[in-house]
Structures are given as structure tokens and as C-alpha cells.
Amino acid sequence: MGKATIQGKLVAVVLGVVFVFLGLSAFMLIKLNTATAELGDLYNKDFRQSVLVNQIDGLSTRIDINILRMLAIGTPETIAEWRRVNTERFVKAEGVLKQMTNEADPTQAPMVKKLRESFNRMRAGMEHQVDRIVAGQMKEASEVNRLEVKDNADTVYTTLEELAKAQQLSAVTRFEAQQTSANLTRNVTIIAIFVVGLFSVFGAIMLGRTILQPIKVAAAVADKFAEGNLGR
């Protein structure tokens, strides 16, 4: 009966340690997978937003260059071609702005809204300017640029710069937060392993005492047999 009790205690301690380590391993795997997935999502989101900002910047610059070409060296044929290309770029830019609006971080949503509104005003001014160029009214076209395009274009490029800086700051902040979370998980794991190890050592000591005590009693009885002192 005593032997069975000792074996039961030994099995219970071993199983307890195994289950604790299995639980700790599962916890670590879950936390690691979660942290990796979150970091990947953050990277993809920040990367997409950065690409979208660069696309708007590039499209706006190329549209502006085509209008300058119309003013400087345009012929009816080239003006018509550059106008067609600009229309395609305006449509593409509108799609990019819509995507930016849908995916914008809440802290950056006001800037994206400001960008979209100023871009639409700039587009209207540029299209009006091109109408004057097509009509051969170069002086009027320059006046439209001054009154309807310039300030809105400045706002577009300024807002793009602000968005780029905000995205960079946001990416750094999120990365640091993710690092803090990873460090916390690592520290908790180290502490948990230490505690499990401590309890394992304590359990082993207690189990050892439990096993040694009956052995000592049996040894004492054997000594009495050998000495013939069974009655004592």
C-alpha cells in the first residue's frame, strides 16, 4: 500500500511538471504567432500607406509637368495627347485617394480628408487651365493657375509630406510597442520557467523524503532483527 502511494505521488509530480511545461510551451507558441502576425499586419499596412502617398506625389508631379509642356512647347496634337494622359492620371489618383481613405489610420484620417479635398480642387483648377490652353488663351491659363491651382497644389504637396512624416512616426511607435510586448512575454516566460523549476526541485526534495522515510524505518526494523531486539 505504501509503495503504491509513493508511486502515485511520483507519477503525480512528473505529470504535473510535464503539464506545466506543455502549457508554458503552448502559451509561448501562441504569443509568438500572435506577435508575428500583428507585426506582419502592421508592416503591410504601413508599407501600403507609404506606397499610396508616393503614388499621389508622382501622379500629381507628372500631371503638372504635362501642363507646363502644354504652355511651353505644346502643339494641338501634343496638347490633346497630354490632356488624355492627364485625365487617365486623375482617374488613377482618385482611386488611390479612395484606397487611402478606406485604409487610413484613425489618427491620419483628417490629413487624408484634407489631401483629397485639396487634390479635387487642384484637379478642377488644372482642367480649367487646360481648357484655356486648348482655346489658345495662354495668358488666361496662367491666371487660372495663379488663382485656382497654385494654392491647392501647395496644400497637396504639404499634406503629402505631413502624411509621410506621420506614417514614419506611427510605424516607429508601433514597432517599439511590439518590442515592449515581446520583451514582456520573454520576461514572463523566464519567470515562469524559474518558478516551475523551483517547484520541481521542491517537489523532488519532498518526494525524496517521502521515499527515504519508509526505507529508514525498514532499515531500523532490520537492525532490530539482527540484534534480536524484536520486543523493544
Image: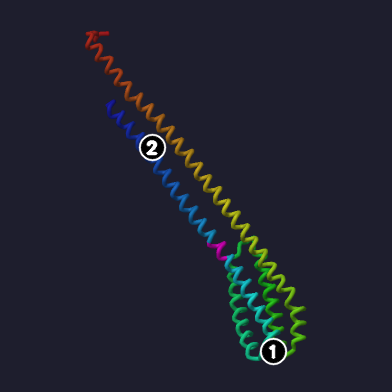
**What residue do we see at 53% from left, 62% from top?**
44
Q: In which quarter of the image is residue 100?
A: bottom right
Label annotation for residue 134: 1
- The percent coordinates of residue 74 (x first, y second) are 67, 87
For the record, the magenta segment spans 44-48
Identified by mark 2, the residue type is Val
Q: Residues within 10 Å of mark 1 (few under 14, many from 20)?
A: some
- The percent coordinates of residue 157 (x first, y second) are 68, 70
Disc 1 secondary structure class: helix
Q: Is residue 41 left or right of residue 173?
A: left
**What residue do we see at 42% from left, 34% from top?**
197
- The percent coordinates of residue 5 (x first, y second) are 30, 29
Closer to us: 76 or 126: 76
Q: Is 113 drawn above or below residue 130 in the view shown? A: above
Nearest to the eye among marks 2 and 1: give it.
1
Callouts 2 and 1 close, C-beta under 8 Å: no
Closer to us: 32 or 218: 32
Identified by mark 1, the residue type is Val
Q: In this view, does 140 lie to the left or right of 3?
A: right
Q: Mark 2 points at which residue?
A: 17
Label annotation for residue 59: none
Q: Which residue lies furthest to the front in this view?
A: 73
**What residue do we see at 74% from left, 80% from top?**
145
Q: Is 69 drawn above or below residue 56 in the view shown? A: below
**What residue do we see at 67% from left, 74% from top?**
119
Residue 64 belongs to magenta span = no
Label 2 and label 1: CA atoms lie apart by 84 Å
Closer to us: 207 or 175: 175
